[in-house]
Each structure stands twice: as structure tokens, then as C-alpha cells.
Amino acid sequence: MHDIIQLLPDNIANQIAAGEVIQRPASAVKELLENAVDAGATEIKLFVNDAGKALIQVIDNGKGMSETDARMCFERHATSKIKNIDDLFHIKTMGFRGEALASIAGVAQVELKTKRAEDTAGTYIEIENSIVIKQQPAAAATGTSIAMKNLFFSVPARRNFLKSNASELRHIVDEFTRVAMAFPGIFFSLTSNGQQVFHLESGSLKQRLVQILGNNYAARLVNVNEETDYMNVYGFVGKPETAKKTRGDQYFFVNNRFIKSAYLNHAVMNAFSDMIAKDSFPMYALFIDLDPSRLDINVHPTKQEIKFEDEKIIYAFVQSAVKHSLAQFSITPTLDFDLDINIQQTDAVSQPFTTDKKDAVVATSLYKTFTQKHQAHFIDGKSDLKNWDDRSPLPEEVVINNTQSFLDITPKKYPLQKPTTDNFIQLQNSIILAENENGFIAIHQQNAHERILYERFLNALKGKPIATQRSLFPVTIELVPGDALLLNELLNDLQALGYLVEPFGSNTFVIQGTPADVTAGNEKNTLEKMLDQYKHFSNDLKFSKREKLLRSMAWQQSVKTGVPLSQKEMGALADELFDCGLPNTTPNGKPCYLEFKKTELDKMFGK
């Protein structure tokens, strides 16, 4: 019998490690940008071609590497950040994962040029399939340039799983903005296919946020800044009027590293409660600084999920800091909390934070008020987060996969439910009552109109385009880079839905025409709200691009509750609803109408 266990060759081990580290071009972008930050650069330039599939290049003016280090950095488990196991729990730098560059070298053709200030010549290295093809001295500026070409060229199966260029570029923009936001003192630029998407001059955090998120926030940011011995919380939140229907503009950083935390998001949402609508999401970019030994950042390969030593204290501080800021800026006249004053007087804050002090804080009525009143002590992990998700259940007819997620809406007739009268009653400007053969029905006007529009739009994309009404005075719309990429992705489908939108410069578009029912002067607002809603679906559900667009348009253009309707309008709405293939529910699964049968009504009255 032969032994059957053997060690993997390095190049295969690197390709497997790449699956941990480099899932898509954006993962490589994150690693390379973080390495540039750690190198002490003051200027970092990112170049991508073909959404990172053909080229990802990062050029920095950091400290550079020696010839030996330049060669060593591509070895597995090579790192300058960790010398013993305790160092793992005191990490303050960004890119420290030993596998990163070795993994990249395993799945791309890599060219590295680097030079330290004290060296007369730099080093040039070419690597392919983890093998060094060329190494030689080279003229170079101080700093490092690393270029990855043909990502996953050696793993074609993995390349096949990449999404469209527009989608992959959006992921790259996400990673780029997260690093750029965390380091406003560094100049960052992003150039895609030779066109500059971002040019971010170094400056204050507020300037960087406005550069990235748009001028809309320039006068609408509230400063957050609370410092204690245990931790500091600083950054900005948007004033309540900037809250959107999408979670997009929400950023948490712990020790300057972007993280995702439903737990901390809940703390911020609680601070905003009663100031914004229940289905809205506030903008925030909040930075938490605390001793690295009080958290574990190694619980997830991308370091985006972390564990805190004491989550409840972090939760209370974050919520307190945001409430304090909103109160100071007179966003709301009274707030039901007293932490903004008292928290600064507790021993745990004003004196060094020992274990005894921590226990004292946990015992205070102030701490208990937070944890009991806001149920933080019930929220220990992911299992308890399910109730925070406000998505509607999906109708059973939805089939979700990579290519198709439309409902099967072959026309069905619902003659029994259909109104048998021309006499409608509108309750509270939202519910339409009408008699039918069985008793009466209650139609929810917004839900019903959403279903009607959804099926109309679906038919438009299936070959019956909606007519476009050309504008006499075309409207120009300027978007932040992320939204501009998104709109570019949707232009063809929007045209079938009656919108003629043309690119005009880097992040600017001209609206040449809209469907006839979009009122003049409302074109820009309609598109902006549609993009907002699209991102809401984009973040929450794995639908196809077209499905997200259809749902966004249907929701955005539907007649909202609170709008009075005439008899004629109510009749038309009812007729169109029952001509739909699936009149029962909205695309999101909310009921469009309820039926009240005479037999059931009789029972209710004891007949």
C-alpha cells in the first residue's frame, strides 16, 4: 500500500489561499490599498482596467522595500507585522494577512517596482503562477508600484464566476471609498479604463465625506466626538432630513478598519428613533478607537466582522455619543436620555479604566438604563438580529437565480373578486372599498398600483417598450461616482421603460426624455429616488439587475397613500389590478386587496 497523504505544491496552496483572501478584484484592491496605507504613503493612486480583471495597479509614495523584502513579501505567511502570537491581539496596522500577496501572485501576473529613500536603485520583480520570472535593479521613485494583470488567468473556473464589469467596478468603488474615508489625510485617486473616477485631495474627515458622498451633505453633517479612557467615538451623522430609504451611506470603522455590525447599527438607529421614519436609514460615518486587546479582528477572513470584549459598553457609548451630538445641534427639543451629561462624570470615564472600574460601570443605574431600556442585553449575536430585518416576505412564486427572477405572470382572471359596481369609497385616502359578488373588497391603492406598474414594466422589457416623451428642455443630473456607475449599468433597460438618459461627462447625465406620466420638472427627482430605491433592493436581496429595477420603478412611481382619488381613477385602478397576472400581492409580497365575504360578515353579526 502506498501512502496517500501528500503536501500540496506551493502554487496550488497559494491558489487555495486566494479563495480565502481574493474572492473578486475588489478583494485585491482592498489588500493593496491597505498595504500602501501601512507603508506611510501620503499619495495613493489606484488604476483599474476592465473592472480589475485586466489590471489592478496601486502606486504609492510610501517607504518602499529593500530588495530582500520585495522578494520575501510574496512568500506564504510573510508579514512585517507579527513576530509572536501575542501580536495577533494587538494589531493596529491594516493589511497584515500573510497570505495576501502570495495569494495574488498565485492567481495573477504581478509586476512590482519598489525603492526606499536611502537606496540609489529600486527593485523590479515579475511573478507568474507564484514563480519569480524576473528580478533586477530598476530606476524607481521612492515608494511602491504593484500591478496585477489578468486576475484568475490560472483559475478560469473562478474567473467565470465574476459578475459584469459594472457590478465588479461597484465593488471596487466600495472598497476604495472605505479605505479613503478612513484616511482623509492621504490623497487618493481612482482611474478606471483611463478615466478618473475619484480625485480626493487630503483634508479633514468632513471634506472627505462630502467628496465621496456628495455636496448634498455639505451643510447637513452633525459632528460626533466623545472621548473616554475606555474608548473614543468620533465622526459624523447626517441630520434627520438626509435619511434615505436605503442603507447605503452607513460606515463603521474600528481602529480605522471598516467593519459591518448589525449590533452597532442598532445602537445608532435607536439614537435616531422618533426623529426619522421607521423605514428610513440615517447616514453615518463613525470611528471607534479602543485598545486592540479589547477586540478580536480575526473572526472573519476579510476582517469586516469583529468581536468586542464587552459589546454592551460599546453599544451604550455609541448610542450615547450620537444622541449627545443630535441634542447639542438642537436637532430635537428633548431627548429621553441623560447620558450626555452623566456619562462624563462616571468613574469609569474620568479615571483610568481598570477591571474594577469596568465592573462599577456595569453596576451603575446609568448603564442599566441603557441596557434594559434599549434591550442591548438581549442582543448578543447574529441569532437575535433576525427581528431587525424589515423586509417583506417574498411571494412563493419568486424564483431567484443568477439569470432570471421574474414572477410567472401568465394572465389569470379573478372574476369573483372583481368589483361589480361603479361606486367606490376611499377611506383615509389609502383604502378603496367596493362591492363584489361575494360581499366587498378593500383595495390598498399604493400596493395595487405597484403591482399594476410592475407588470406594465415587465411587459415593456419583454418587447413592448413604453413610449418616451422627449423633453423640450433636457435636464442635467450630476451624481456621486458610485451612483453614476449604477446608472450607466441601467441605461438600456431604462430606455425600454420610457427614459432616455445619456452620459454627459464623468458623473453627469442628460435626461432627454421620460414616460408621458412623469410631470415636467420632476424628471431629476424621479431618477434620484429610483436609484435610492434600487440600492435598497440591491443591498437586501439577491435579485437580477432587471428585477431590482422593475421593483424600484414600480414602488417609486406608484400612487402613495394619502392621495385622494376620483371615482374614475378608483375604477381604473380596480380594473387594471384585476387584469394583472397576479393581482393578489405586490412584487414584495404585500397584499393588494382583501376580500370580505357576505357569509363571514353575517356570522360576525350573529346571522
Image: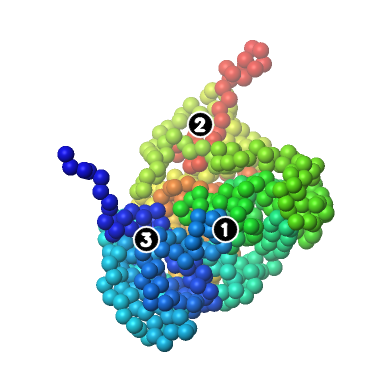
Q: Residue at x 37, y 79 (%)?
A: 123
Of badges 1 and 2, nearer the viewer stands 1
Q: Earlier in the sequence, mark 3 or mark 2?
A: 3
Q: Position of residue 484 (x, y in %)?
A: 49, 66
Q: Residue at x 43, y 76 (%)?
A: 65
Q: CA distance from mark 1 to mark 3?
A: 22 Å
Residue sitting nearer the eye, 46 or 477? 46
Q: Position of residue 322 (x, y in %)?
A: 71, 55
380 relative to 70, above or below: above
Residue type pointed to by label 1: His
Q: Earlier in the sequence, mark 1 or mark 3?
A: 3
Residue type pointed to by label 2: Lys
Q: CA distance from mark 3 to mark 2?
A: 69 Å
Q: Residue at x 69, y 57 (%)?
A: 231
Residue type pointed to by label 3: Arg
Name, please, the residue furthest toward the bottom. Answer: 120
- Name the residue beneath numbered marker 2: 418
Residue sitting nearer the eye, 281 or 477? 281
Q: For the residue labelled by badge 1, is the local secondary structure a helix, a strand or a loop?
A: helix
Residue sitting nearer the eye, 134 or 85? 85
Q: Quadrant of the C terminus?
A: top right
442 left or right of 457 in image: right
Q: Earlier in the sequence, mark 1 or mark 2?
A: 1
- Name the residue beneath numbered marker 1: 90
Quarter of the rendering containing residue 359: top right
Tag on residue 76?
3
Q: Position of residue 447 (x, y in %)?
A: 55, 41
